[in-house]
Image (cartoon, rainbow, N blue to C red):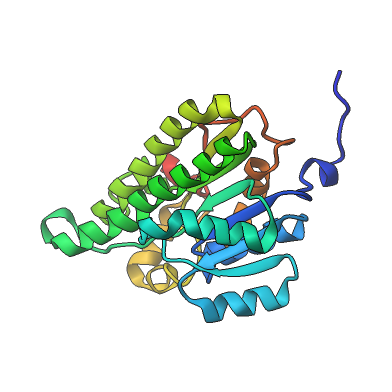
Amino acid sequence: MNQVLAAQRLFDLTGEVALVTGASSGLGARFAEVLAAQGAKVIAAARRTERLAELAAAHPNIHPLSLDVTRFEQLPAKLEEAEALAGPLTLLINNAGIAGGLRIVDTPEDEWAAIQKTNVDSVWHLSQAFAKMLMARKGSGAIINIASLVATKVGVSSASYAVSKAAVLHMTKAQALEWARHGIRVNAICPGYIHSEMTDDYLASPAGQDLIRKIPQRRAGEAADLDGTLLLLASPRASGFMTGASILVDGGHALA
């Protein structure tokens, strides 16, 4: 029988090197802090470099990296830049994303294109470059894709955003199947409505308050509500036999 590990050791990420996209605010900044607190070296990547500098200044395990995930031609070089900062990457958190606010008949082409490019295409291209890097050195690792409750439950968000997150869920399964034999695990987190810069104005509105009353727990989530799920999927000891999974963290919203 395998040794029973204390929780502190089970979720210890010492030796892991993580790249977190969209890390200048909201969930991405929280993910970077949580991973760093458990011993990982973290590359916090985003376009708003001044915010990244503030984040890194408060956490010695966090290194800032200027990154636009929609500049696909630059992604392999950016991964090399990340490794130059902190060592060989072992973990990728595909968190960067944007939201829309319109229904299908009202959505202009440029909004649809921007959402798919950021939320879907960037996950495809960055994951592909990351996997190639690991395969080239025969190293193992993990990818955590940030999907959403609306990947499975339409009608509580803009259609273009919901479609993009559904694509991320299916992509997670395809990546997991193809890359399992290379020692690369791929899983997804599907948050419900979480307080952040992106959602706070809506959640404070009458429509947002009405939505919260429909959530079984009668509250929106906090970024900290995702800490345990993130650490579960990031730790090779805690989730070494998990790949292709998606975990809802939504206060029971999917049941309502």
Q: Which sits in the foreground, 140 or 132?
A: 132
- Choose between 205 and 54: the one closer to the eye: 54
Furthest residue to the top?
A: 1
Does residue 116 sit above or below 180 in this rendering? below
Residue 93's place in the image compared with 209, above or below, is: above
Q: How many marks?
A: 0
Q: Which residue lies at the image location 71% right of the left edge and 76% below the top edge?
A: 58
Relative depth, front residue between 88 and 110: 88
- Residue 18 position, x and y percent, is 63, 53
What residue do we see at 53% from left, 71% from top? 24
Picture coordinates of residue 200 (x, y %)?
45, 71
Q: Residue at x 27, y 56 (%)?
A: 158
Does 232 sit above or below residue 33?
above
**69 displayed left or right of 82:** left
The C terminus: image quadrant:
top left
In this picture, residue 51 sits left or right of residue 120 = right
Q: Is residue 139 left or right of residue 243?
A: right
Q: Quadrant for the N terminus, please.
A: top right
Task: State the image coordinates of residue 201 (x, y, percent, origin top left).
Answer: 40, 74
The quadrant in which residue 205 appears is bottom left
**Residue 248 visible to an observer of this rendering:** no
Q: Visible in this render: residue 114?
A: yes
Q: Position of residue 151 (x, y in %)?
A: 36, 44
